[in-house]
Amino acid sequence: MSGTRIYLTGADGLLGTALTATLREDPRTAGWTWCGVSRDDYDIADETATVASITRFRPDIVVHSAANAVVDDCEANPARALAVNVAGVRNVARACLHSGARLVYLSSDYVFDGYDNPPGGYREDDLPSPLSVYGVTKLAGERIAGQLPGHLIIRTSWLFGGADERVDVVLHSVRQALRGEPVRLIADQYSRPTSTVDLARAMVFLLTRQRPVTGTVHVANAGTASWHEVVTYALALAPPLPGPAPEAVPFDGYPFLGRRPRNSALNTDRLTGLGHAMPHWKDAVRRFAVTLLPVETARR
């Protein structure tokens, strides 16, 4: 794998930032060359620009993490969601076919409707049934990526650990609480909260296997929780807060634009069987909380 060339879309996003750092620091990717692009470089919905950029770099692997991941934004503007989350994947896939690169596509637990609630979580071969525009576009992206030889689709869930409050519930909620503002979080919707750092490490594991991993793999931290439980746990690590504890609100009747699954927990047995066990979400939250909470918390 020495000398591997990897091209990453969405490099400034929640996952892209963590993956870039992991590629730089992990000894398994020493000697790799990577190119990270974002919206500042070109619009992923522009086929000409996308194909030109990817083929010019001559990658061995393209990791496509760029997406509109704000569920309500997708619901409010489905045309743009289709352009980014579907046409964008098509453009990247065409570039991969043209350059001979392997496509790694990032997808979401929101391809499931959450009605079945299977024991142990949704498996890779369970039938998707998305509820929202966002979920539909991510599933469409899977279908496009799945046509390429050697593809890898990574489904993940409820990412946190970044710097963008629009898409990071933990970051946004902790900052609200530290400012003394009220925090309201749903307490009866569940999934597997996942650290971007742990996801990036799992991706490096998958990408550096001697025998390429193909098909679909679920990658998420261990343990199922609601966002209310996650943020309450994070804030319990802090000194006394200036405001009230997070308020638990019900899932039913919450004014979402796009519908969400009530329980979209993913089963990660395939990843474990390949030899990579994910840490528990509580361990991941502790590590992230140290970077957000007052200095005395880090000394505990």
Image (spheres, rainbow, N blue to C red):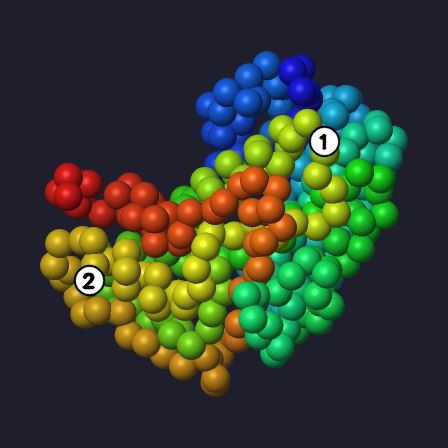
Quadrant where the N terminus is found in the figure: top right
Residue at 57% in and 61% down? 266
Would you identify the image quadrant in which residue 182 lies?
bottom left
Q: Quick check: 294 left or right of 222?
A: left
Q: Which is closer to the viewer, label 1 or label 2?
A: 1
**Residue 171 seen from this side:** no
- Asked if the residues shown at circle 1 and circle 2 are in contact, with their CB atoms under 8 angstroms apart, the answer is no
Residue at 30% in and 48% down? 286
- In the displayed image of the protein, which residue is found farthest to the bottom? 253
Q: Quick check: 92 left or right of 230?
A: right
Q: Quick check: 110 left or right of 148?
A: left
Disc 1 marks which amino acid?
A: Arg
Q: How many marks?
A: 2
Residue at 77% in and 22% down? 58
Would you identify the image quadrant in which residue 226 lies?
bottom left
According to the picture, the residue beneath numbered tag 2 turns out to be 180
Q: Position of residue 232 (x, y in %)?
A: 28, 64
SS at mark 2 in the image: loop
Q: How many residues crowd mark 1 within 10 Å: few (<14), some (14–19), many (20+)?
A: few
Residue 4 drawn above or below residue 103: above
Residue 241 drawn above or below residue 101: below
According to the picture, the residue beneath numbered tag 1 turns out to be 211
**Residue 101 seen from this side:** yes
